[in-house]
């Protein structure tokens, strides 16, 4: 089993509309809110059980940024010691973002080369 880095700190920056995670391997990921929402791993957002995956949806990094109640974070909560649950202003809160999934979603140029 591969060791997955874990978040050391997580903060939401409302003015910049992003989540910043400092990982245990010293990597820093900055996720625009629209990217997190576009990659929501819940069955509703994925379009059914057949579309479920532990990898972000294809093309998610090519989407245009969006600023709406769909992409404004209301709250973030830990789910045990393995994931985050994000509630959005539009009422959606079904996605459980495990840390391995979040790390695979990192939009930085270093991570996108993998």
Image: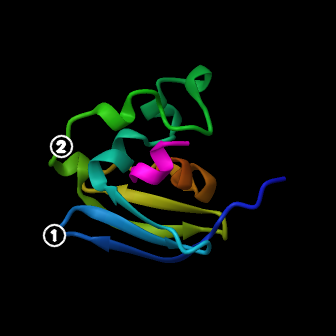
* 91 sits left or right of 107 in the view: left
Q: Is mark 2 on a helix, strand or loop?
A: loop
Residue carrying label 1:
15
* 1 sits left or right of 102 in the view: right
Q: Earlier in the sequence, mark 1 or mark 2?
A: 1
Q: Can residue 95 be seen in this view?
A: no
In the image as oriented, which residue stretches furthest toward the bottom? Answer: 9
**Does 30 appear above or below 48?**
below
**Does 65 appear above or below 24?**
above
User: 110 or 11: which is nearer to us?
Assistant: 110
Q: Where is residue 67 in the image (x, y as percent from the top left)?
A: 15, 48
Boundaries of the magenta span: 107-114
Q: Position of residue 30 (x, y in %)?
A: 36, 62
* 45 sits left or right of 90 in the view: right
Q: What number of labels is visible?
A: 2
Q: Does the magenta stretch include residue 73?
A: no
Residue carrying label 2:
66
Say which quadrant the C terminus sits in. Answer: top right
Q: Is mark 1 on a helix, strand or loop?
A: loop
**Does 66 appear above or below 106?**
above
Q: Which residue is drawn at 41% across and 67% down?
A: 76
Q: How far apart are marks 1 and 2 (CA)?
A: 14 Å
Q: Which mark is residue 93?
A: none
Which image quarter: residue 6?
bottom right
In the image as oriented, which residue stretches furthest toward the top? Answer: 50
């Amino acid at each position: 089993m591969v060791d997955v880095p874990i978040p050391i700190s997580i903060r939401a920056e409302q003015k910049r509309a992003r989540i910043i995670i400092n990982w245990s391997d010293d990597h820093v990921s900055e996720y625009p809110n629209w990217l997190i929402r576009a990659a929501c791993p819940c069955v509703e957002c994925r379009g059914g059980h057949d579309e479920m995956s532990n990898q972000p949806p294809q093309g998610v990094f090519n989407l245009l940024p969006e600023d709406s109640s769909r992409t404004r974070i209301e709250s973030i909560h830990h789910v045990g010691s393995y994931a985050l649950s994000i509630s959005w202003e539009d009422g959606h809160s079904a996605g459980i973002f495990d840390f391995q999934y979040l790390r695979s979603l990192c939009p930085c140029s270093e991570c996108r080369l993998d």
